Amino acid sequence: MNSVTTQNPIKITQITDTHLYGTPSGTLLKMNTAVTLNHVLELVKANESGTDLVLVTGDIAQDASDKAYGSFLETMSGLNAPFRWIPGNHDNITVMNRIAEGTGASEKTAQLNNWLIVLLDSSILGQVHGKLSKTEIKFLASALRSAEKDDSIDHCLITLHHNPVPGNSAWMKDIGLENAIEFFNTLRSSKKVKCVLYGHIHQELDFMHEGVRCLCTPSTCIQFKPSVTSFCLDRVNPGYRSLQLFADGSIESEVKRVSGETFEADYNSPGY
Ligand SMILES: [Fe+2]
């Protein structure tokens, strides 16, 4: 793991659930995901100068194709910032690792000043819900154990794709992280864990759970309406999250959405 000394606060940008296709004309519920990603990245460029690290938290490709990941990498190169990616339920980790070879994008930890960022794979190939495998839980426990002993690390941010706290809509009941209790039990082994950051449920959330700040971030394409019984798209625009990680462990964070544009989508769809 490379330790990087940078500005204080550390500036992180989170992009999630881009759902790109192998062809640029690909649409998800009639929304062109390549077009909306470009709008979001223009907003990032306008607002986030000096980003230390971009975290891309899964569902990068809708079809897990080489071409979709290739076009994601090409689009991201316009940001001129280092990034890390983790898989979501629509992704294929083997394809991602092959495409990212030599770029550092698949590295699972990053230390910036006195913050450690841990990136977890919660995907199960072919399944919508997520689970941290035995290997992944072991890796997390070991990373936290090392962090506890390391005087250069005071705070940890953990990121994964799936929601480790049940979603606020009845239809989300079975799509979150299956072993969330084991996950939070593992986090409890370290007092340095300050934040859990995720995507998957395509909406903005900011709340405390088990003493840890939980942040969920809107997709760069379709949005899921919160607190409903059945699946329903929300008529709010795509966006991203900016985070400022301070040396004292505090976090300032804000979701920013594209404005002045209306994007077509199938708002009456019963599912996705
Ligand atoms: Fe997604």
Image (tube, grey):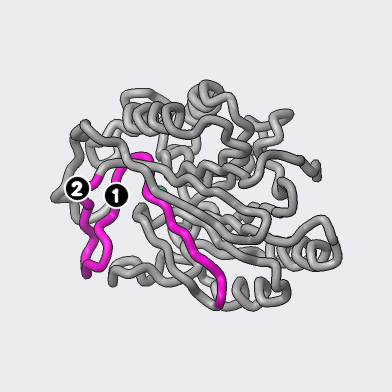
Q: Which numbered tag is attached to residue 235? A: 2
* x, y percent for residue 148: 80, 67
- Disc number for residue 62: none
- What residue is rendered at 20% in x and 40% in y? 265
The answer to whether 97 appears left or right of 222 in the picture is right
Name which residue lies at 77% across and 58% down: 153
Compare residues 224 and 204 and report the one nearer the observer: 204
> What are the residue bounds of the magenta stretch?
211-236
Q: Is residue 222 magenta?
A: yes
Q: CA distance from mark 1 to mark 2?
A: 7 Å
Q: Name the residue that disc number 1 marks.
A: 223
Judging depth in this view, the residue of 63 and 31 nearest the camera is: 31
Q: Is residue 95 visible in the rendered structure shown here?
A: no
Q: Secondary structure at mark 1?
A: loop
The quadrant in which residue 175 appears is bottom left
Q: Is residue 89 magenta?
A: no
80 is higher (above) or lower (below) than 155:
above
Residue at (52, 41) in percent of width and height: 13
